[in-house]
Amino acid sequence: MGSGGTSASMELRAAQVRDMYARLLQGELSGTDALAASQQMLQILMDSMANAVFWKDLNSCYMGCNKVFARFAGVEPNLLVGMSDRDMPWADSQAFSADWFIDWDKHVIETGEPAFGIIEQLRSAAGEERWLQTNKVPLCDLDGRVIGVLGTFEDITNRRRAEEELQRTLDELDERVQQRTAQLVLANESLRREVEDRVRLQAEERLQRAYAEALRDTAAAMTSTLDLDEVLRQVVTGVERVVSADLIAVVLVDADGEIRNANHRASFGYGEVRHERLEGLYSQLSILRRLGVDEGPIIIDEPMDALGAARSTLGARISVADQLMGFLFVESAVHGFYTASHAERLGAVADQAGAAVSNARLARTATEVAAAEERQRLAHELHDAVNQTLWTSALTAESLLRELGDDDPIRERVDRLHRLSRGALSEMRALLLELRPDDLTEVGLDELINYLISALECRRTLQLRVDLANVQLDQDAHHTFYRVAQEALRNVTQHAEATSVEVRLTDGPVVELCVVDDGRGFDVEQVPSGHLGVAIMRERADSIGARLSLDSRVGGGTVVRLVYRRPEGLP
């Protein structure tokens, strides 16, 4: 019944169209009725076409379409008016954006030239990606002015798929022909290639045996010692046996990424590279920056920051159980020199180095722990025995001095004993602090320097002028000021032959330590190489950004001055 009703409706509709068309031709309709009839006939004509038809205004907004287009877009024709491609299902298509279609509209409108055969991929209202062949022509009014664009498109998805399938078939046939041709060529050359393969395999086997022996010997050498510096030297030697390089370098870093050990070897003609330069350029080396984020091994064949004239660099991480311990890398002055085979060999040495370095560090840690425990034991024994004895001796001498008269013949010797006991007690306190370095920070800087001065008094008879402020510094600066004062006063005791010493420690935004003596002095420019005190003081000052100055001349005494400006924002 439904089918019959539809057929009758279609016949009625056709009869109405024929009647309207006849009346239009005979002139029975005019004005608004004629226009409506013409529009209806145009719509019927458009809806009868197999291809999609649409038309837009100068702003690329839809003015109308036929039913084929409406079904594809999933929009009723009367609702389409005023919409643009940005409102269509294909607006976010992966292949073509909405601007693609709008740009074609603008091109046709601006040039007045039609565009045929535009191949586009759209997403339909049903969510399917379809291939279309679109034609667009200028839409003009009766005066020939362009008022929009008229377009049609044909769904060529099936044709395109057929073309692609045909192309795949042709490609497969071509591949088969090439395979058959290659098989014929290989058949003619099989004997020659078999011989070449055998020769190459034998050479590779010999090379692999040599590499295996080199790796075995390297592992044995690295694990034969627990001295970290010797381990680094063995690592460099091992790399030299398995990877050709103009420069080999191994660096170890701590948890903060700072280099703590480094070793390298450069070949003749590549240029000498000093360890100091290696440490200074650590943060600038391309290979190490890359290895910091990539496990590697890594090959770099591009312009880079390197230690030498490198045009090819290969690097690998040194790690144990995912713990980064350092880096191993090689450089070559030949562009593109390193290959995956080199990377595999370097990676094998790096793996061996990780275990050896870990063992050496553990051994060093164990030694340091044992030494620390021994220092603690000695400190306790000295404190409980010798320190108490010295304290008792000093108190006894002080008690005797109070009982003896000023003209007593032994008063001078008892006074000497008292001063020696007090000085020895100060030296003992300083020694206990050395045995327990952590305590250095807990004792005030002025008190620490007083210990040193008291120890100096018991060794030499000196006129002392002491002015020490209670200065509060961070741990590194605190240790540096103490060590510089210690070294300066040690030089007074051992070398200066002074009769008077002045020690000043002033506080403020700039903290200054000054040790002045009237001893024999020395030529600052002619310090013997074996005397490292001055160099050590300078290194300590540099470590905290302080300035150390030495003013001395032969026979004119010595002034040691350490000046430290507190960082901004700190008290």
Image (cartoon, rainbow, N blue to C red):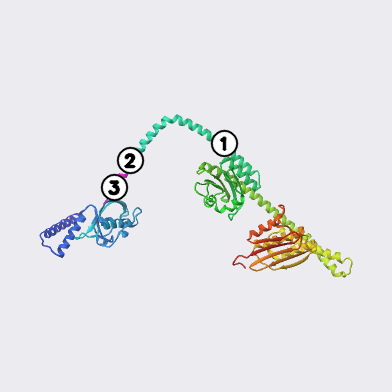
Residue type marked 3: Asn
Q: Which residues are magenta?
A: 150-164
* Residue 393 in sight: yes
Tell me if 384 is positioned left or right of 1 in this view: right
Q: Nearer the viewer, residue 77 or 537?
A: 537
Q: CA distance from mark 1 to mark 2?
A: 49 Å
Q: Which residue is mark 1?
A: 209
Assess whether residue 445 is covered by the magenta stretch: no
Tell me if 243 is positioned left or right of 113 in this view: right
Q: Nearer the viewer, residue 343 or 379?
A: 343
> How packed is label 3: few (under 14 Cα within 10 Å), some, or many (20 or more)?
few
- At numbered mark 1, what does the secondary structure look like: helix, strand or loop? helix
Q: CA distance from mark 3 to mark 2?
A: 16 Å
Task: Choose the circle earlier in sequence order: 1 or 3.
Answer: 3
Q: Residue 314 at x, y = what percent? A: 53, 46
Q: Residue 498 at x, y = what percent? A: 77, 62
Task: Choose the circle earlier in sequence order: 1 or 2.
Answer: 2
Q: Residue 570 at x, y = what percent? A: 61, 67
Q: Which residue is mark 2?
A: 169
- Which mark, by number, is residue 158? 3
**In this rendering, the label closer to the viewer, 1 or 2:** 1
Residue type marked 1: Arg
What is the quadrant of the N terminus in the image?
Answer: bottom left
Q: Residue 247 at x, y = what percent? A: 57, 45
Q: Quadrant of residue 125?
A: bottom left
